[in-house]
Each structure stands twice: as C-alpha cells, then as structure tokens.
Amino acid sequence: GPEGPEGMPTGVVHDAAGTGRVEEDIQCLHLCLRAAVGGAARGLAGKADVEWVLRRLRSLQIEADDDTWVLAMQVLGNAAQRGHASVADAERLLDKAEASRHKAGRIASAAVHCAFFEAAAAAAQSRKNKYAVDARERLLS
C-alpha cells in the first residue's frame, strides 16, 4: 500500500469515520512499543506494556496491523531473554494476532510468525538456563 511517514503503511487502519486520527493513534502506539522493545532488553518493560497497548487498541476499536504485532512480539522476546516472559505468553500473543488479522480478513504475516519463533526460542533458552543454574545450585548445596 502507499507508504506514510517513516515507511508506515497508510490506510491500513480506519475508524468508523475514516479519519486520519487513527493513523496518529497507531503511530503513537508503535512508538510506545518501540520504546518497550528497548526497555524490555534492559528489564524495564515487558508483558504489561504489550497488554496496555492491546487494551488501548481495543478501547479505540482499532485492529492492530502486522507491524504492531511484530513489535509486541519483539517486546515479549526481549522480556523472555531475561526470564520475564514464557513460551505460553508468546503463544497467547500469536493467537491474538492471528484472531485479529482473521477478523480484518487477512492472515498474520511471515514477519509476525518469525517474531513469534524468536520470542518462543528466547523463552525456551532462558528457561533452560534457569534450570541449569538451579540444578548446579542443588548439586553444590
């Protein structure tokens, strides 16, 4: 589709009145998620931020686009690396993404699925490391 500022696809989201207000709202939420991606890597953001953005979208009656779901999944992936999100969290988010895209008459993009696999892998790796540390501590105690 036509590209908006910063390569954002325009016209992907419309509210009932078809105004540009939705564009501003979604770009705002994308900025929040981008900040949360960085924050999650430092342990300063995570699931709660993703949930806040999804609640905000619901209250604005906006269906999230693929970029939104990818960013949300990246937040979870970074949180998962620090042990703050699980494979189940990533699966729940993927379910929401697929349901939302289905409602919009589309399928979740490959990018959404890639972000999911990265988040799930990060969560699994983090869990494996935690078990290794726990086992080591038990052996040494």
Image: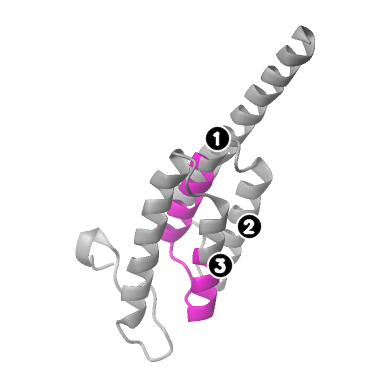
Tell whether 132 sits left or right of 47.
Answer: right
Q: Is residue 71 above or below residue 30?
A: above
Q: CA distance from mark 3 to mark 2?
A: 8 Å
**Which residue is rendered at x = 60% and y = 28% of the image?**
125
> Judging from the image, what secondary structure is the residue with disc 1 in?
loop
Instruction: Give the image location of residue 59, x and y in percent.
Output: 53, 79
Instruction: Give the image location of residue 16, x and y in percent.
Output: 43, 89
**Which residue is rendered at x = 51% and y = 38% of the image?**
118
**Which residue is rendered at x = 60% and y = 61% of the image?**
96
Tell whether 136 sits left or right of 106.
Answer: right
Instruction: Name the residue beneath numbered marker 1.
Output: 82
Depth check: give the residue in front, 50 or 69.
50
Depth check: give the residue in front, 101 or 50.
50
Q: Reading the chain from its start, which is encountered first: label 1 or label 2?
A: 1
**Numbered label attached to residue 48:** none
Q: Residues within 10 Å of mark 2 (few under 14, many from 20)?
A: few
Instruction: Give the image location of residue 81, x and y in percent.
Output: 54, 34
Q: Reading the chain from its start, which is encountered first: label 3 or label 2?
A: 2
Q: Main secondary structure of the magenta part?
A: helix
